Amino acid sequence: MAYLRKLPNFRKLSKERIEAWKKIATASASDMMNRGGAMSGAIKPVTSATAICGQARTIQCIMADNSILHFASSTAEPGQVLVADACGIIDVAVWGGLTTLEAYRRGLAGLIVDGAVRDVRESRAVPFPIFCRGTVPQGPHKAFGGVMDVPISCGGRAVSPGDLILADEDGVVVVPLDREEEIFHKAVAFRRDEESWLKQLDTDKPFYQVLNIPTPDIIE
């Protein structure tokens, strides 16, 4: 297969908006999408750095081949997040220590890959967040091609170029770019609600009452 890519033409979020999103947890963002948007819990961090907030550059890997990821890590813009569908394969790694170093030096915000990585020790020496499905020593081919900047599936979620990617210790959430403004304002309002709940908890009020959950009826 050839190496293919689309020219990215998505709306870029301002630096100020990205900084504001960094204050919003993945759990809050997911809640504001009707408890949706989260990737599978099988996509986990392998480095101590876990905070990711940036727009997606998507990669569709050919099975057991990572050549398109090398191109992506060298051409994506600072602050962007590489999101790769590596077919969910955990028997062949498509990312390693040198690609981590390249991505970090170029200022990328992180990597999310539905597949495996290797060279974990080297990657952990760099403050670059990596989320993946697993780790394995066996490396990939570099001959079959791949596609960049097209809609993909990663961790059970559809991801399009430019979608906002949030990640933390809880996992990864995808905010579709066409809903970003809506979800952002909902999440900011939700943070204010949580601050109100915390104040009520300080008064020893039961949490279920704070949430207006009714007291269960007694079964005779």
Image: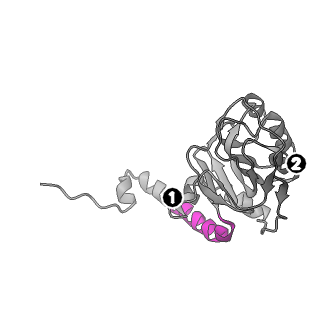
Residue identifier under label 2: 74
Q: Could you say where residue 57 lies in the image, as x and y percent from the top left?
A: 77, 56
Residue identifier under label 1: 194
Q: Nearer the viewer, mark 2 or mark 1?
A: 2
**Which sits in the foreground, 150 or 122?**
150
Residue type at the position of mark 2: Ser
Q: Quadrant of residue 105?
A: top right
Residue 183, compared with residue 53, is above or below; it is below
**Which sits in the foreground, 2 or 87?**
2
Q: Is residue 193 magenta?
A: yes
Q: Secondary structure at mark 1?
A: helix
Q: Could you say where residue 203 lies in the image, as x and y percent from the top left?
A: 40, 53
* Quarter of the image that includes the C terminus: bottom left
Q: Is residue 113 visible?
A: yes
- Mark 2 or mark 1, which has the lower sequence index? 2
**Which sits in the foreground, 48 or 20?**
48
From the viewer's perspective, is 203 left or right of 65? left
**CA–CA distance between discs 2 and 1?**
40 Å
Q: Secondary structure at mark 2?
A: helix
Residue type at the position of mark 1: Glu
Q: Residues within 10 Å of mark 1 (few under 14, many from 20)?
A: few
Give the residues in magenta: 176-194
Q: At 73% across and 63% down in the image, what residue appears? A: 17
Q: At 63% across and 60% down in the image, what residue appears? A: 158
Q: Quadrant of residue 9?
A: bottom right
